[in-house]
Image (cartoon, rainbow, N blue to C red):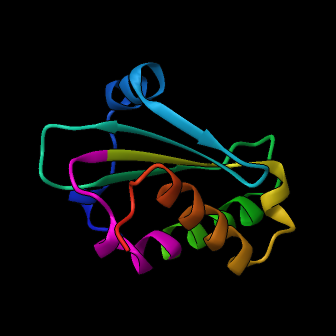
Amino acid sequence: MLARKLRICKKSDFGKIFKSGSRSSSSLIKIFWLKNDSLKCRFAFIVANSVSKKSTVRNKIKRRLRAIIYKHIKEFVPEFDYIIMAQKPSVEADYQSVEMTIVDQLKKYKLLNG
């Protein structure tokens, strides 16, 4: 589980990232990011009702996304806030394909070292 200081919680922070941040999307996920004022990365995960009506499925997707981020946390470029939003096809996708998609998108925009 990500520590509280590594999570985005305020509604105003979400608004800033969505309004002023950069974005990348694929069929499985969308990633939004914006430079912040601290030396830490912060994360938020969104799985909307439109992805699945079942809360168990949405929570499973969120757990997968958190695990992927936790696995690669040391590779992230500091000073950025990230919002990772699941898309409908991520319900049927396996863990490895979601992980590859996230890592590829982050490396493409030089947000992940290595």
In the drawing, does residue 33 fall left or right of residue 26? Answer: left
Q: Looking at the picture, tell me which residue is in the foreground, 94 or 57.
A: 94
Magenta stretch, residue numbers: 68-80
| Residue 52 visible in the picture | no
Name the side, left or right, on which 37 lies relative to 15. left
Q: Residue at x 87, y 67 (%)?
A: 92
| Residue at 35% in and 35% down | 34
Where is 35 relative to 29, above or below? above
Image height of 19 relative to 7, above or below: above
| Percent coordinates x, y for residue 62 in the rendering | 59, 63
Q: Residue furthest top?
A: 19
Residue nearest the observer in this picture, 5 or 70: 70
**In the image, is residue 71 part of the stretch drawn in magenta?**
yes
* Residue situated in front as seen by the camera: 112 or 95: 112
Q: Residue at the spot x=33%, y=71% of the render?
A: 75
Give the x, y percent position of residue 111. Answer: 38, 54
Residue 50 vertical placement versus 5 (above, below): above
Quadrant in which the C terminus appears: bottom left
